[in-house]
Image (cartoon, rainbow, N blue to C red):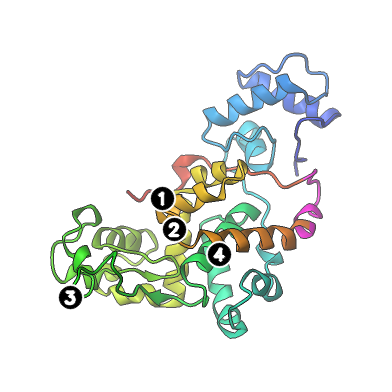
């Protein structure tokens, strides 16, 4: 197991990192075992070249790409996400639906390798913003999807950007699930990516089945993993939220849940072996993630 290294670290592991960076074509200067600005700059350049989050931290994914050639794996903190932790993040939600659906959500995050602290909190905070009851739900008619005097979701009927083909596609492919999956095109593509083939397009109501809803959430976030983690690295929760929702809907709930989760999980994550100061925000290479347009 490789140590997590960042600026200010010293010792033989830093020297090893420096030699590995130099061998990869990213010269950090002298291999003196001191993690200074030159080593950080070389590491950031290497990370950018290999589709990793350019945070200047040598975590498990960076080490794997640097020395092993494979994608590696981030530290899995899903085992620390207890009912008590999530209940604190959802202070107005009954415990029963959290206890019922949390295992499916965590299982879906593991399937898509979203197991590090930032992405786990991103997923849970997204649920808080989209479906605070911690249950997959239907989108309700509103002025944003239904015209005055129109039939429900008529403003979605002809949204060709969503792949809709006219009535009744607006109502048929309205928002559903933990993340409000919307539009024929998204139902079709994500359905295939979570192993449902065309079943989700043929039976869109399945997006509210908890196991499928959890997979949809994880798949949707996995596709946007790198820009989301860049936003989280910069502490820009509003930008992270926009990458999912396209706006600021539910931002207050999202932010509150994320911050509570950070505070609750900090001790657990920092206690992981060989983690220094705070967990890294490493990222899988882009080509290992399924693509949704």
Separation of marks 1 and 4 at Cα, in angstroms? 28 Å
Q: In the figure, 180 relative to 29: above or below?
A: below
First in sequence, mark 4 or 2: give its number. 2
Q: Answer yes or no: do the residues labelled 1 and 3 have beta carbons within 8 Å?
A: no
- CB of mark 1 within 8 Å of CB of mark 4? no
**Residue 192: horizontal and vertical position, in percent?**
33, 61
Q: Which residue is mark 4?
A: 253
Q: Residues within 10 Å of mark 1 (few under 14, many from 20)?
A: some
- Residue 125: numbered disc: none
Q: Nearer the viewer, mark 2 or mark 1?
A: 2
Q: Which residue is mark 3?
A: 151
Q: Which residue is mark 1?
A: 290
Mark 2 and mark 1 residues within 8 Å of each other at the beta carbon:
yes
- Number of numbered discs visible in the structure rendering: 4
Residue 268 drawn in magenta? yes
Tell me the distance, in whole angstroms, between the alpha carbons under discs 1 and 3: 35 Å
The residue wearing badge 2 is: 219
Q: Is residue 217 left or right of residue 230?
A: left
Q: Are marks 4 and 2 in contact (CB under 8 Å)?
A: no
- Sooner in the amino-acid sequence: mark 2 or mark 1: 2
Q: What SS does tag 3 mark?
A: loop
Q: Which residues are magenta?
A: 267-277
Residue 24, picture quadrant: top right
Q: Is residue 77 visible?
A: no
Q: CA gap, disc 4 to disc 2?
A: 22 Å
First along the sequence among labels 4 and 3: 3
Query: Which quadrant of the rendered structure holds the N terminus?
Result: top right
Labels 3 & 2 near each other (Cβ < 8 A): no
């Amino acid at each position: 197991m490789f140590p997590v290294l960042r600026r200010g670290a010293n010792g033989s592991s830093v020297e090893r990192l420096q030699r590995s960076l130099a061998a990869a074509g990213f010269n950090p200067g002298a291999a003196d075992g001191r993690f200074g600005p030159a080593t950080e700059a070389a590491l950031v350049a290497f990370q950018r070249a290999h589709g990793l989050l350019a945070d200047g931290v040598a975590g498990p994914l960076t080490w794997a790409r640097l020395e092993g050639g494979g994608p590696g794996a981030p530290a899995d903190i899903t085992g620390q996400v207890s009912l008590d932790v999530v209940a604190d993040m959802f202070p107005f939600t009954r415990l029963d639906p959290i206890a019922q659906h949390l295992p499916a959500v965590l299982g879906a995050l593991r399937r898509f390798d979203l197991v590090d602290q930032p992405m786990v909190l991103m997923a849970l905070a997204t649920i808080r913003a989209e479906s605070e009851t911690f249950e997959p739900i239907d989108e309700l008619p509103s002025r944003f999807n239904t015209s005055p005097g129109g039939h429900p979701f008529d403003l979605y009927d002809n949204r060709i950007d969503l792949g809709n083909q006219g009535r009744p596609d607006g109502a048929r492919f309205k928002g559903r699930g933990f993340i409000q999956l919307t539009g024929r095109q998204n139902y079709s593509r994500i359905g295939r990516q979570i192993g449902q083939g065309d079943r989700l397009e043929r039976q869109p109501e399945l997006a509210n089945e908890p196991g499928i809803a959890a997979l949809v959430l994880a798949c949707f976030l996995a596709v946007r993993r790198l820009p989301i983690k860049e936003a989280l690295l910069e502490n820009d929760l509003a930008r992270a939220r926009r990458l999912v929702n396209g706006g600021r809907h539910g931002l207050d709930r999202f932010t509150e849940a994320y911050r509570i989760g950070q505070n609750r999980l900090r001790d657990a994550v920092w206690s992981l072996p060989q983690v220094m100061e705070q967990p890294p925000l490493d990222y899988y290479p882009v080509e290992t993630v399924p693509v949704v347009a």
